[in-house]
Image (tube, helix red, strand yellow):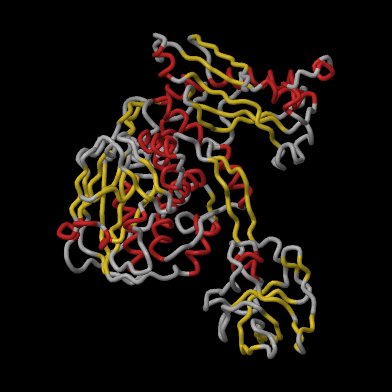
Amino acid sequence: MFHQVEGLLIDEYCTMGDLKGCLERLARALFGEGRQVRFRGSYFPFTEPSAEMDIDCPICAGVGCRTCKYTGWIEMLGCGMVHPHVLRGVGYDPAKYRGFAFGIGPERVAILRHTIEEIRLFSANDLRFLKQF
Amino acid sequence: MKVPLSWLKEYVDITMPPEALAHTLTMAGLEVEAIEYIGADWGEDIITAQIAHLEKVAGSDHLSYARVNTGTEELGIICGAPNIKQGDKVPLARVGAKVGDLSIGEKKTMGYHSQGMLCSPRELGIGNDHSGIYILDPATPLGQKLVDVLGEVVFEFAIKANRGDLSSIIGIAREVAALTKQELRIPQPVLHERGRPTAEMVKVTVEDTDLCPRYSARIISNIEIGPSPEWMGRRLLAAGMRPINNVVDITNYVMLEFGQPLHGFDYDLVRHHHIIVRRARPGEEIVTLDGVKRKLTPDMLLIADPEGPIAIAGVMGGAISEVNDNTTTVLLEAANFQAASVRRTSVELGLRTDASSRFEKRLDPELTVAGANRAMQLMAEHAGGTVHPGVVDCYPSPPQPRTITFSTDDVEWLTAVKVTQHEVVEALSWLGFIVVPDEHSNSMQVTVPTFRPDVVESADLVEEVLRMMHDQPAGSR
């Protein structure tokens, strides 16, 4: 089973700078104003350029712990500028239109936000767990 | 993909500490998943020593008593390993050392004092072999901390599916060179070719060129199968491969180095000395190198001789023509197979190998001859053979290099980052693109190197420019 929250925006103006600004605000809204955010180059077939966004680990505040594999960073999501193939595929001219896209696993966000150690709890249908939210 | 840094340093100077390099590469999209420090737990008391004298322990069927020289003193050691002899240089764990969970103390056994322990590769954590003591290179100085001799830092990379070129140490070195502005050094083998020309010794027929764009073959004769040199075995182990014999090890070594999978056939076992690259026929079967009989289907590409299959293209060789202890002449295959076909065959057979996982990511057809020549050079050096003149090279339609019209505006359009023409030319040139800037505008013509089939249009080049700019230049808005 696999859940993903997707974001997609296409217009004549947006750039990777807007994507970054948007996702930084999202990270700080979810995990606190003081969060550090970084973007790493990556690869996804539907975006170009592509990146992954990391936040400084909310569990250890970036010092290094088991959750962040002692790197101080946690991978949050994948994102990028909509690939020209995708735009052409739906009849938009990539020289005129551009867009950004991102995808987040909601379980991952919940795990970090509520310090949940067991991902299987989400699908166990236990009301005691579910009623907490 | 595991890369020992000492191996990487053959092709590029590394100018920063391993952790800083890992960070630079990770931010540029070449993710370092883990850093392994081989030998970090050996401490001060595992050192290099030489066996000065060896005698059997009376009353024991396997123990011997060694006097070992550390350069400054001579110690007595009781040892049960069968493979050591006088003059061998070995790793010695002195009294006080810790070997894994074992603390080394002075012991008295059958009337002898033992003042330490000689270590096997498994005890040191650098291999699975526990059949004997690790024999060091004869040139190793005595009394050195072992970590200074055999210690290694190994990066484990997660290679993205679009970057087949990075499944090689030279490919990674090229990224390191570009990101740290260092020169890249690619081995240029010099071969001494003699004897009958390759083209007179073997015939290659590629029937299905759609699945095999290139097939290059070379021959080396009069070789002697034996163990590969110690340094090569150690590098292969650090990279996660088991040393087997000189010929097999060299094919693996060059695969890791250049990213070109190679396969060695025993030339004398290839019937009629004729290689045929074709799809399998209904009902055909092959016994692969691992001894398993596999049923083939007509969408699978085979290497065959006139009498039947001898390998599954890009996946695994067959047992019938395998290089063995009696092999004297090796027919070396360096081929390029279509990525989708190799992936499908590998999935259908449930057989994933180091070769298939590379072909699946699309390899540069220009690599075949470079890889074959490098392997010939190493085999001539370490298996002592005669390299026959020329390559039999079936390469009916080499791909035309792709040229993309690109401009600094393309970077700004997608990222809102302002860059100069000079910065773009610089960044792309470091990565191996050929860039001809327009003198009257901020545009340029960019020729894509054959090892970057993933770069097709301007958005791909924007990403390349962005990756080369370290400090996350795309500002947030």
Q: Is residue A20 left or right of residue B8?
A: right
Q: Residue at x 39, y 31 (%)?
A: B455
Up/down of B204 relative to B196, above or below: above
Closer to the camera, B246 or B232? B246
Q: Is residue B239 left or right of residue B461?
A: right
Closer to the camera, B181 or B285? B285
Q: Is residue B435 visible?
A: no
Up/down of B148 relative to B420, above or below: below
Closer to the camera, B105 or B348? B348
Q: Is residue B474 visible?
A: yes
Up/down of B365 relative to A38, above or below: below
Up/down of A75 relative to B13, above or below: above
Closer to the camera, B77 or A74? B77
Residue B21 placed where, x, y %?
58, 47
Q: Residue at x 68, y 18 (%)?
A: A26
The image quadrant of residue B271 is bottom left
Residue B430 placed where, x, y %?
42, 42
The image quadrant of residue A123 is top right
Residue B263 placed where, x, y %?
35, 54
Residue A117 placed where, x, y %?
78, 31
Quadrant location of the C terminus of chain B in the rendered image: top right
Q: Residue at x 73, y 27 (%)?
A: A120
Residue found farthest to the left: B200
